[in-house]
Image: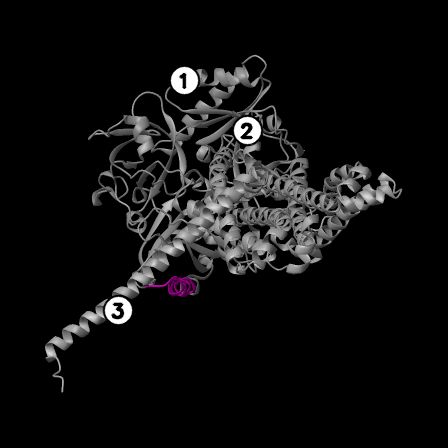
Amino acid sequence: MRQGLPRAEARRVARLRFGAVEAAKDSARDEMRWAWLRELGRDVRHGARRLARAPGFTALAVITLGLGIAASTALFSVVNGVLLRELPYPEPDRIVRLYQVNVDTPGGEARRSGNVAEPNVADWRARTRSFQAIAVMSQAGVVPVAASGDAVMARLTPVSDEFFDVMGVRPARGRLFAPDELREGAPGVALVGPALRQRAFGAELPSNAMLRIGQGFYAVVGEMPAGFDFPGGTEIWTPQEQVAPSLSRTAHNVQAVARLAGGVSLEAARADLSAASRAVKAEYGDETWMVDAAAVPLLEQTTAGVGPAIRLLFGAAAVLFVIACTNVTNLLLARDAARAPEVALQLAIGASRWRIVRQRLVETLLLCVSAAAVGVAAAGLAIRGLLSLDPGTVPRLREVGLDWDVMGFALVAALLATATTGLVAAFRSTDGDLREVLADAGRSATGGRARERAREALVVTQVALTLVLLVGTALFGRSFVRVLSIDPGYHTTGVVVLNLVVPGSSDPAEGGARRAYVQEAFMTRLAGLPGVTEVGLVSGLPAGGGRYPNGQYLEMTRVDEIRSFEDVAALGDRVRERMGQAGFRVVGGEYFGVMGIPVLAGRAFDGGDTANAPHVAVVSRSFAEARWPGRSPLGRYIQFGNMDGDPRGFRVVGMVGDVRELTPESEPGPLFYVDYRQRPGQASQVSVVVSGPAPDVMASAPRILREISPGLPLEAGTIDDAFDAALRGRRFNLVLIAAFGVAALGLAVLGTYGLVSYLVAQRTREIGIRLALGAAPSSVVRLVAARGARLAGAGLIVGLGASLLLTGIVRGFLFAISPTDPLSLVSVAAVTAAAVVLASLVPAWRAARISPTDTLKGA
């Protein structure tokens, strides 16, 4: 009997055997991995050689797909940079903008207002528990700023002490405002941005840096980090606490931002804010217009005005990408049809379908990766083009560029293109009957009727998607033409615009007198220039050239009904029906004449309307129709003192035409005009308008202003520039969608041409026999062109149906035109059909020139 091994030795032997087995398994797995990599390498080399042997096909496919990837990548860079990328603040998703929901007239509509009343903000702080901090800020304004020498224009925003906790930022250099600086009457202090620091002080901020802002001097206590300019474009921040607060709950003079407390959701914060606001309304009644409140994430609020347009344009770019993929798929199907005998032979001698599909996928992947490289390079150029078209209304557009997110998107697009184009072509290349294909191998098989239908379906898809893009282009173009055809109510050419800021002083009367002196002297000197016919000024130039302050007015029954603000408060609710909202504009000189705004009734301001004369006003047609429908506004009395702190009323002496202030398509609003000599309180920032030779006026104006008041900054331009700026957003959308539409039409034409050419090549023998039997060349042209016409017709039917289904998407972007505008639909359908049919006529003409003799010889 054999003696067994000792237990320890047996265990050692077992371990050795187990280790040997595992090592063998690992070796086998490694060998499989290397074998798979070797096969993949062979497939890559095989695919690269095939692409190199067909340079024309490869170049066409790469350029076509690269165009689609470039468009979608460029637009994704905008989506990512503007809509998706977080704001550059700590935990930016916790920062919200607070809005009041107001009802300002009995039975009126509830409207959300970004400007809020300071007492209401104090109640939000006291009655809510959902916010870590709530800050207020006054509306940013342009002020003259100087460290030494001439002043420059800079945007200043007063902010409360909580502002820096809400935003989560601290100065890069220096400090925040000290507690003893956060009160009325404290010495002026300011924080500056790096751009202003560079302009005012150079490379370094001096320890004792001072700025003259307006007529006051401010100690610069710190410099904010690079890239921080909230609210948009701000370069100077001063303490809001140094500004006397308004105690009125109907005076909406500040804006509010807040940071959510830790662990508090946005929904919970909204409910808390809403409950507090409704409680304030219940307590104060008609003393406040606020009936509710809203909290909106800061990123959403920042991009609210541009988000829909950017998403629409990205959708258009995605459609172009799909068209490019469709085109390349069609190219691959046509190429594989010619290679059908080769594939059939491979299958016949034992090659697996998966091996052939894998080779096709690798080849397509090489094609798509090459297209992605071309697309990324083209996207970089496209992004530069987008930046050059910057309409000035897209926040953070200057930050858009090719980053890793965008590069990753391009790679994903390439992989998606591989999946959509490669899989279809790869599986189609192996689905034929072997005997049929091999039997037809000597005659360049067409690939079967099924494959032919598949290629036709792809062309129909291309035509349909192209039609959708072109319909959008036509609608945007017609809408833009409608906007240009509108009379905005003022001259849009031939007016020089000189933007001027004349700061006030601690004494309102003294500051108003100084403003009136500088402005009148400036206009008088300008009027004396050769060629100048009229000069005027306004506190809010139409087409975005100035501020647009609105406020509440009260119609009086007699001129002495109100002598002070206490009289307004004493009237209480009894005068609610006599109240209204209107824009308050300070004008001077020949403003209405320069701008071409007609006087419809009464008179404009004249030399007798001096500071000590009875105060008079001119109203717009919309103001008169809203306040006194069907009656004359002349001789009526209006109190509008909440706009400039002067309780004296006005007598209406004239009515002028309406103007469309913000954009040409914006509806005219009620406007109330006052003379700058009588009410200089809102006339610190004005636009002086001049009818005269632009080069001479713009060259002389800075010198004249320096002689009158040295150090005041001046910006010169024309009304043409201002009006053009108002159209840039709409033009930006039109140019991009038109570019996509034209590119899509080119791809559709190319796809149709390629398919019809291929079909002609495959039917060369048939066409030769037809001609040999006496068929007229014109009948051959008709036969081939009819194929293209059928494809165009099917694509048009599908495309028109899709366009009608998508009308709701574009409705909000159109002006004075329906998304189902018949002229746009018919004209685009005609252009698309003509282009597709013409694309098929070239191969049809070549088919008619086929030599029957040569064809039959080669049969």
Highlighted magenta segment, given as a residue range = 264-278
Q: Can residue 251 be seen in this view?
A: no
> What is the three-letter code of the residue carrying label 1?
Arg
| Cα distance in 3D space between marks 2 and 1 | 25 Å
For marks 3 and 1, the one nearer the N-term is: 3
Q: Is the magenta stretch mostly helix, strand or loop?
A: helix
Is 299 located above or below residue 487 in the figure?
below
**Which percent across, then down, holds residue 64?**
57, 42
> What is the three-letter code of the residue carrying label 3?
Val
Residue lying furthest right = 774
Q: Which mark is residue 721?
A: 2
| Residue 724 falls left or right of residue 513 | right
Q: Is residue 802 magenta?
A: no
> What is the three-letter code of the residue carrying label 2?
Asp
- The color scheme shown is one colour
- For label 3, count other residues whose C-alpha is less than 10 Å away and answer few (under 14), some (14-19) or many (20+): few
Q: Which of marks 2 and 1 is in front?
A: 2
- Secondary structure at numbered mark 3: helix
- Circle 3 is placed at which residue position? 21
- Circle 1 is placed at which residue position? 706
- Secondary structure at numbered mark 2: helix
| Residue 170 falls left or right of residue 405 | left
- Secondary structure at numbered mark 1: helix
Nearer-the-camera pick, 177 or 834: 834
Is 321 located above or below residue 620 in the figure?
below
- For label 1, count other residues whose C-alpha is less than 10 Å away and answer few (under 14), some (14-19) or many (20+): some
